[in-house]
Image (cartoon, helix red, strand yellow):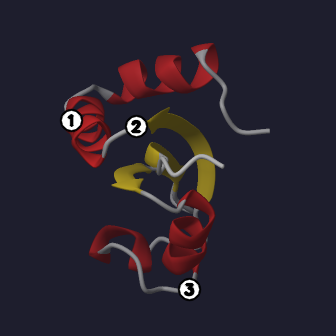
Amino acid sequence: MSTEKNNYTYILECSDGTYYCGWTNDLEKRVATHNDGKGGKYTRVRLPVKLVYYETFETKEEAQSREWHIKHLTRAQKEKLIREKPQVH
């Protein structure tokens, strides 16, 4: 049995069409938390949110670094990332 934890960098599409990027070690729970209005301040007023992209990492540091890089992309670059590497099934 593997004891490694998965860490995720994710992008949510908010109800107003904007994107929110974050990281977590429990993706399903984190998306539910956002949709319960208990997630980030940004998403609380833009519900519901939809998971449109994620990447998996072995460490939280890798996930946090990727989050930082994605947050600095333009909207067009984020849309290209979502289109070219669909992770959500």
x, y (%) of residue 25? Answer: 44, 58
Q: Secondary structure at mark 2?
A: loop
Question: Mark 3 packing: few (<14 Cα in 10 Å), some, or many (20+)?
Answer: few
> Horizontal and vertical percent for residue 18?
44, 50
Asked which secondary structure carries label 1, the reply is helix
Farthest right residue? 89
In 3D space, how far apart are the residues under numbered discs 3 and 1 (Cα atoms)? 26 Å
Asked whether the residues under the numbered discs 2 and 1 touch, taking CB atoms below 8 Å apart as contact, a structural biologist would say no
Give the CA separation, mark 2 to mark 1: 12 Å
Front one among 65 and 72: 65
Residue lying at the far front of the rendered structure: 1
Name the residue tied to disc 3.
36
Which residue is denoted by mark 1 in the rendering? 65
Closer to the eye: label 3 or 2: 2
Q: Earlier in the sequence, mark 3 or mark 2?
A: 3
Task: Tell me, for residue 52, which label it has, or none.
Answer: none
Residue tagged 2: 58
Asked if the residues shown at circle 3 and circle 1 are in contact, with their CB atoms under 8 angstroms apart, the answer is: no
